[in-house]
Image (tube, rainbow, N blue to C red):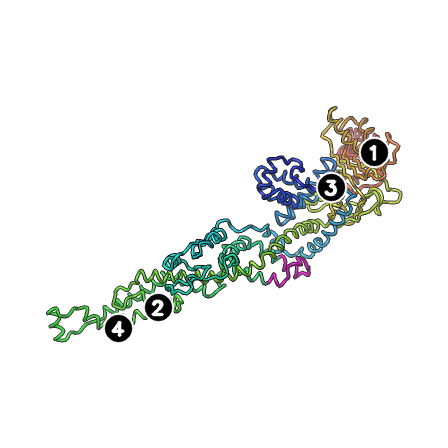
Amino acid sequence: MCSGKKIQSLHELPGVGERVAEKLKKRFGSEASALKAIFDGDLAALSGINGISQAFALSLVREAKAKNEGVSISDFLKTKEAFEIYSRLLKLIQSFAHTSYAQEKLSLFYPYPAAQKTRIEKRRALLFPYLKIAKTLEQEATFPILLTKVRQLKAEPETLWIRDRIILTSDPEALPFLKEKFGEFLSIQAAESLSEFVDLGRGYSHVIVFDDTFLGFDLPAGLEPEFFSGGPEKVAFWQIVPEKELAFFARNLSCIKACLGVLLTLRAQGFEIFDTFTTEEGTKLEKLLEKLNPSGELTEGFDPEIDRLKTALEALDSKLSLSLEAANKRFGELLEKSSVTLRGEELLRLANGDLEIRELLKGEVQAAYKKELRKLIEELSENLRLEGSEKLLLERLFPGEINYPLSPDSRGLQLLRQTLAQKLEEAKFIRKRELAKALFASRPAIETLVKAVLDFDLGFSIGCFSQHFGLSMPKLSQKAGIGFEAGENLFLKAKYGKVSPINYSLGKTSFSQKGLEERVVLLSGVNSGGKTSLLELLAQCVILGNMGFPVPALTLELGPVDEFYYFGKSNGTLDAGAFETTLKQFSVLADRSSKLVLADELESITEPGASARIIAGILELLVRDEQSLGIFVSHLSELILKNTKAKLRVDGIEAQGLDSELELIVNRTPIYSHIAKSTPELIVERLLRKTSGKEKEFYELLRSKF
């Protein structure tokens, strides 16, 4: 039993030396933070440290938990085989976890001794609501899918650089603070003069200024700084770099949306869970998140102006090319059809060189050129949905003089492109800031919700496990005994889907027949009849029951068990050293405590006569302790009874005979106070029925010996 003393130092934990302690402190920042991570069971963070395996992280957390609670996993699970059954059960339960968080946290659930009844009752009370939820949502196919998308929140990306924004200041004292606060994300420059201010600000779609030195000056077109008063220390981070806040939500978008889906699904089913987060808040946040895509950008359709500018910028070159091609084709056809009539005077001036052909053509074609140019500009403006100053920039792309083929001015085109891009980034920045402000306000609630949903999956996974296998909460009794109706071995049910239910009782329970309340039993029966399966079922029931979990039976009564011993089949007769070691394992049974001992064919450790006497001695020890329960599977029941005067019951799993294929028909539920036929007797009977003549006479002789 552990002391229950609060751990104050990493070095108090087994396996933590100076090297491991330094790694833990480096990862979590301090010893106190490292201890908190261990107490919180943060297995993912612990096992992520170089040199710390998943197994060591788990043992570290279990040790810390044991020291703080004053009880460890080995206080209940007393043998290697008992721990193996617990591990198999845990793996089965973990298969129902929807999140890695729940899967890891389930490893911290283990059975308590009955003396820790308060902890067991607390666990039971915690699980009851989840059993109900799992039953209600059994047909909700999308709900588990939502949970699979939930994970611990990721931090903002470490590298985030805003290229189209700059902070300018004329105050040299403010510069270090600005660089420390914002320098990781965008450019920060000092401007000592107006010209320097203008030069630095040009080329950025948004200029932020934290003093009013240049506030009253006329600035060039396109340079419209945003002035903040009151100093940079008073401004919220999302006002300057909203992308940082949006990046956090973008990285966790799927997770947060899934959590909101979990919340709203549960509320729709009438479960008032996650009470710190209202349904209205959930709906509002869902709508906000619809405006953000996983890359941290605003979704299309969120803002019509952003969509207009983005479309215009993306389509500018292609639309311009198509419109120019059509305009040049029309204008070329017009020129081909055109003719010039010269009067006599004009002919003489042309011959004398006093009149150029361009002047003659200009008058004739200018009107048609201007008409075609207006049509081109109107068509482009409409197709690109340009507005205000954008239209003026478009008109400046083409000269007023005839220019064929029509082609835009490259500088004018670049200016139009820059203007559209700058207006787009400015519009996006304004909307990002608005969205970041709203999301920033909800971040604490979101962090709480995600943690709550992860914890919810821990309980819900157990509920799903229970619902899948049809488990029920056991009735805890103060009498030494365990009894159940319609018990089903979980390992077999998981493998085969359907198993024969078993009714059985040991000790004092409401299932015990009158006069058959023995606490220690010998179990006989045919090979492959289900004796080992029954022991496993009992082990599953007592482990799950002492974990505070539901058990694999329709109804079950469980008396106090502080220690659980399971001894599996031996692989043959042991040598002297191994035999001595095995006996030492049983010596602990002399301790007077409420215990359950399950042993499977212990006689195989040595020759039958000696085995019978050893088993008889162990059983006598258990009978004397009125708090102990025990079932020993053995084919030597009659020989064991001859070696003891203790009051023992012998139950049998009986074969009811042979089927038409001459295979054994077995009733898996033990018959009380009945020594079952052995497998050899039934095999002899089967061979007898298959043969005739002299061979049949031989098997008749053998059968008469049983």
Q: Name the residue under label 4.
A: 367
For marks 4 and 2, the one nearer the N-term is: 4
Which amino acid lies under the numbered mark 4 shown in the image of this protein? Answer: Ala
For residue 589, above or below residue 414: above
Q: Distance between the residues labelled 1 and 3?
A: 34 Å
**Disc 1 marks which residue?**
619
Among numbered discs 2 and 1, the one appearing first in the sequence: 2
- The answer to whether residue 495 is visible is no
Residue drawn at x 58%, y 63% is: 284
Mark 2 belongs to which amino acid? Leu
Q: Is mark 3 on a helix, strand or loop?
A: loop
Residue under label 3: 4
Label 3 crowd (10 A; few <14 / some 14-19 / many >=20): some
Q: Distance between the residues labelled 2 and 1?
A: 103 Å
Would you call the spot at circle 1 few (<14 residues within 10 Å), some (14-19), or many (20 or more)?
A: many
Q: Which badge, 1 or 4, is on the more N-terminal residue?
A: 4
Sequence order check, earlier mark of 2 and 3: 3
Marks 2 and 3, Cα distance to the nearest angstrom?
A: 80 Å
